[in-house]
Amino acid sequence: MGVFIVIAVGAGILFAVVYGSKSSNKKKVWLKENIPDHLGLLQDVPAQELLNKLEASLSYEYINQVKIRFLSDHPEISEDEFEWRLFELKRYFLLNSIMHHTPMFSNKVDEIWHEMLMFTKQYETFSVKYLGKMLHHTPNLEPEPAPQERAFFDWVFSQLFEITEYSWQAWGDFFHYPINRNVLKDVETLDDEQLKQKYFKVTEENEELIDYLVSQLRTHLNSTQQIYNIDKKGKFERPARYGDLSGLSAMMVFYSYFYFDDYWVYAKEYAYAGNVQGTSGCSAVFCGSGGVKDSNHADAGHTCSGSCSSSSCSSCGGGCSS
């Protein structure tokens, strides 16, 4: 009888180990119907005309050719995930049209861009229709991201777009690096026109959006002193879910300005926020192990393994299910 119990217990443990291993290795399924409308633009962001122009510049025939070729070359990638990658690439194209420096920080997104470049004539037509000139490919070739360029990228990204779980998967960690002190000094000392010309590609079509971003920069910087006067270590609300995380960009400015060298010591308390109510352990900002990784690494991005169950991933991410 005792031997039977030992065997039964051993079999149960073996089953749990094997089942747990299979569950942890289960690939996430990204559903294209969960992709936000209008590129996930946040409310009151004056970018709808730019978005309309971008969409009109990408013909269905061109994108369909890109999709067919990409999926043929990458049979392990689903059509739905292709649509998620394309969604993030369109966001990148919008950022590229307004910022002077926009390195490509995502291998996943860059693969779609590479595929678009294979159709030379169609890509040139898209570029000229969208920007009036060739949109040159600008990958990030460094093994680690350029920290201050990545920080400004994150700040602008979070001002314009909601951040989905796939955004974390594609781009890696947001809000991990402090904003360059020289940028914040410029916000203090330069007038609006000087700021716009130094950091953005100003055109008649995008000037309203750039005015909005400059105003947001000034608002965040002005609020830092008020916050510091109340609490020198700063105190911010933690985001309760994916989506509008623009509040974290104000946190970025505060700790970049007052605690640049120790930025991550303070910022990680907010960038890795507490659990979302009802999501069985999913972090409010990401689902994953918490290691800082750049999306240009093979194991980059955050997954739902380890910190939340399959049922909770879809509720905290809004863009995936298992």
Image (cartoon, rainbow, N blue to C red):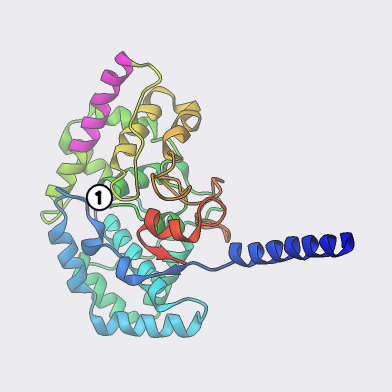
Q: Residue lying at the far top in this picture: please name it.
A: 229
Q: Is residue 17 magenta?
A: no
Magenta-colored segment: predominant secondary structure? helix
* Spot occupied by residue 297 in the image (x, y as percentages of width and height): 56, 57
Out of 267 and 47, give the one closest to the viewer. 267
Out of 184 and 135, give the one closest to the viewer. 184
Which residue is found at the position 26% from the left and 85% from the top?
61
Q: Residue lying at the far front in this picture: please name it.
A: 1
Which residue is found at the position 36% from the left and 31% from the top?
182
Out of 7 and 80, give the one closest to the viewer. 7
Three-letter residue code for mark 1: Leu
The residue identified by callout 1 is 160
* Spot occupied by residue 119 in the image (x, y as percentages of width and height): 36, 82
- Residue 168 occupies which quadrant of the picture? bottom left
Residue 121 appearing in the image: no
- Residue 57 occupies which quadrant of the picture? bottom left
Which residue is found at the position 24% from the left and 53% from the top?
98
Q: Is residue 135 above or below residue 213?
A: below
- Residue 228 occupies which quadrant of the picture? top left
* Spot occupied by residue 167 in the image (x, y as percentages of width and height): 39, 56
Query: On the rendered image, what quadrant is the N terminus found in?
Result: bottom right
For numbered disc 1, what is the local secondary structure? helix
Q: Is residue 8 above or below residue 149?
A: below
* Spot occupied by residue 96 in the image (x, y as percentages of width and height): 30, 57
Residue 280 appearing in the image: yes
Out of 310 and 10, give the one closest to the viewer. 10
Magenta segment: 215-230
Q: Residues within 10 Å of mark 1 (few under 14, many from 20)?
A: many
Q: Is residue 224 magenta?
A: yes
